[in-house]
């Protein structure tokens, strides 16, 4: 799937460092480019996806640093066969950008699940992501799971 088909941006597109980082993050995930994605993060960055305790992060402390974020990719993102992002709205101010997103994932065996969420990206002065906080409810996502 090409980046342009996998990331549909129906939101304000004004230039902002955190918005650029968000678009680059989604494009790298959609294309399966692990190293490109990891390169978008500051060395001590934090990924909370979802925010709080979940089956993906029972302690709810998130995944810190490129090693921790890399393990998050390997255990979660890397196992998804395909991603499609639809950004419905985007609010950028200060060092942050909050995006209203629907992420449709094709899973092993062809099942499909959609995660409706708000993802907040925070960047440092060089544009590297210091924090990615995805607010979504796992139970709602699981309710969308459809068999092939």
Image: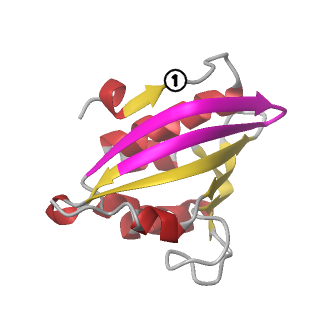
Q: Mark 1 points at which residue?
A: 10
Q: Is mark 1 on a helix, strand or loop?
A: loop
Q: Where is residue 97 in the image (x, y as percent from the top left)?
A: 71, 36
Reply yes or no: does residue 137 show up in magenta: no
Scheme of image coloration: secondary structure
Residue 5 is drawn in which quadrant?
top left
On screen, residue 48 above or below 121: below
For this view, does 16 lie left or right of residue 7?
Answer: right
Asked if residue 86 lies left or right of residue 1, the reply is: right
**At 67% from the left edge and 16% from the top edge, which residue is drawn?**
14
Query: What percent of the width, then of the height, locates residue 138?
Result: 51, 68
Position of residue 90 measured from the top left corner of the image (x, y, whole percent): 65, 31
Count of marks, rendered view: 1
Specify the farthest residue to the right. 94
Instruction: Compare residues 137 and 14 and report the one nearer the observer.
Output: 137
Determine which quarter of the picture holds residue 64.
bottom right
Apparent side of residue 94 relative to residue 104 in the rendered image (left or right): right
Residue at point 54%, 41% (across, down): 101
Task: Please tell me which residue lies in front, 107 or 35.
Answer: 107
């Amino acid at each position: 799937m090409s980046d342009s088909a996998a990331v549909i941006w129906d939101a304000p597109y004004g230039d902002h460092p955190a918005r650029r980082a968000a678009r680059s993050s989604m494009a790298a995930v959609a294309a399966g480019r692990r190293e490109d994605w990891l390169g978008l993060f500051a060395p001590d960055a934090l990924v909370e996806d979802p925010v709080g305790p979940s089956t993906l992060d029972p302690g709810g402390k998130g995944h810190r640093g490129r090693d921790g974020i890399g393990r998050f990719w390997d255990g979660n993102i890397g196992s998804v066969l395909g991603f499609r992002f639809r950004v419905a709205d985007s609010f950028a101010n200060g060092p942050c950008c909050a995006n209203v997103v629907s992420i449709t994932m094709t899973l092993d065996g062809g099942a499909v699940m959609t995660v409706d969420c708000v993802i907040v990206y925070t960047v440092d002065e060089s544009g590297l992501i210091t924090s990615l906080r995805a607010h979504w409810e796992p139970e709602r996502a699981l309710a969308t799971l459809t068999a092939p």
